[in-house]
Amino acid sequence: MIKVEDVHKSFGDEEILKGITTEFDKGKTNLIIGQSGSGKTVLLKCLLGLFRPEQGRIYYEDKAIQNMDDEEQRKLREEIGMLFQGGALFDSMNIEENVMFPLRMFTKQKKADMLERVNEVLKRVNLENVNKKFPAEISGGMQKRVSIARAIVNKPKFLFCDEPNSGLDPKTATLIDTLIQEITHEYDITTVVVTHDMNSVMEIGEKVVLLKHGKLVWQGTNQEIFKTDNEDVTNFVYSSDLFKKIRDVQLKEG
Amino acid sequence: MKYLQDIGSYFLMLKRVFGSFTKTSVLRHLIFKEINDLIISSLGIVAFISFFVGGVVAIQTALNMDNPLIPKSLIGFATRQSVVLEFAPTFISIIMAGKVGSFITSSIGSMRVTEQIDALEVMGINSLNYLVFPKIVALMFYPFVIVFSMFLGIMGGWVAGVYGGFASSSDFIAGLQEDFIPYHLFYAFFKTFVFSFILATVPSWQGYYMKGGALEVGKASTNSFVWTSVLIIAANYIITQLLLSA
């Protein structure tokens, strides 16, 4: 579980996060949603320790990241898997080397054992026979799957995903969403996904946190999001033409 | 003010490069890769330029010798002094600032743009140690490139001088051996070491701290060449003043 307590973050005079307080539950896919510029990615980077909040605390299983020394933070990061928006695969390495990277860095396993684990996770994300290819030689969807494989290869306790389905066709996007949710349940990890895709909210939003102008304006499940009369939620959800039409049809049908 | 901030950030980068080391087995692999990318792959261009510039130095020296009282051995002497003292250590370093420097900046800059550096940091890896330290170690082999350049520069001078009919082989070799001061080699290699450090770290700083997209990677590579060259020239002046004019 990750607990966020009154987190404030500014860049210069501009306050981006204005006192965020929430919890991200273990074994669930927790979604941070909001419009561009609402502070989603800044919150994610604060959670990852890439940005240091000026105020507030972030707890990883009851231990505040701010109170950890460098060694503790390094150890914590070994327990974190991250799926970046663009995949962030290392161009100079082939797929096998990319996925093996965390094992090479943090374990003392033999190469054969590492290779076995790499093949296991590649199979888990439905990728086979790509081991020797380079990231530039595979599609965007495959790159995302390799990135998921790299994120889970060292059996993390926490998985973070930044816009996991941006730039993907709807079918591949759904596949990635489903994969993230399945892995979350299978490994019983805390997953935090940053997205502005309503399809993801519907598919995998076991807990949804809505940010607006750096403030948390609503939190609940993907079932509750369509029932609430919170104005910020309805403005966000029905800014999508598709959802507006669905609502209009539902209203017409009574 | 910005320049002061940049200087501060450069030294803070250096501090981080030498802190929290990457696993030795991984680092060893990275160092060999950088030796190949930065040193071995530069030998061709260094050989080509050194040989022909050495030849030009010999020809120009010969063509400017009007007085018959000046011995022909001066051609070999002038070639040796030009190549050993300035051409190989400094001129080749400026060329390397273009070749190796822009390669370092663009490769690290591309990693920044595509979040690969963030990926390293999230994994708890000291990305500066992982990316920059192997380059610094690889460029410790840079003096071998300069030895190679000195040898080929002098060879080029000998070929141009002898086969161009400007001096006999024995005159040229006598000139090479004339008034040889071993301290000049210390001076040349001392500054080569300083330049190698500049070549590894200034382009790395430009790439690591760049912001933006592909266009900015290009701009950072250009800036990298400009600043690396400026620092090499400035360091060359200071070292020459300190080591030779005392």
Image: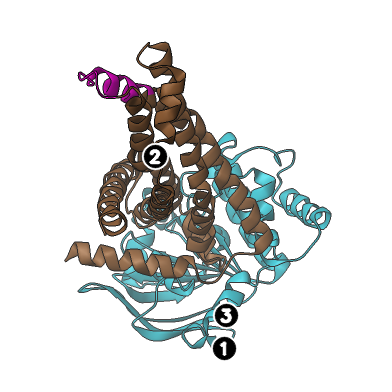
In the depicted view, which residue is nearer to us: B97 or B131?
A: B97
Residue B23 seen from this side = yes
B67 inside magenta stretch: yes
The quadrant of the image that shows the C terminus of chain B is bottom left
Return the mark for residue A62. Answer: 1
Q: Secondary structure at mark 2?
A: helix
Q: Chain of mark 1?
A: A
Q: Secondary structure at mark 3?
A: helix
Image coords of residue B121 (percent x, y): 51, 65
Q: Nearer the viewer, mark 3 or mark 1?
A: 3
Q: Is residue A184 left or right of residue A201?
A: right
What crowding class fits label 2: few (fewer than 14 Cα within 10 Å), some (14-19), or many (20 or more)? Answer: many
To which residue does mark 3 refer? A71
Q: Secondary structure at mark 1?
A: loop
Q: Which stretch is magenta? A: B55-70
Tag 3 and tag 1 share a subunit? yes
Image coords of residue B81 (percent x, y): 35, 37
A12 inside magenta stretch: no
Q: Which chain is cyan?
A: A
Image coords of residue A55 (percent x, y): 35, 85
Q: Please tell me whether residue B205 is drawn above or below residue B45 in the rendered image.
A: below
| Chain B palette colour | brown
Q: Chain of mark 3?
A: A
Residue B45 seen from this side = no
- Residue occupying image coordinates x 24% and y 67%: B5
Tag 2 and tag 1 share a subunit? no
Which of the 4 image quarters holds residue A92? top right
Cα–Cα gap, marks 2 and 1: 64 Å
In the depicted view, which residue is nearer to us: B134 or B158?
A: B158
The quadrant of the image that shows the N terminus of chain B is bottom left
Q: Amino acid at mark 1?
A: Asp
Image coords of residue B145 (percent x, y): 49, 40
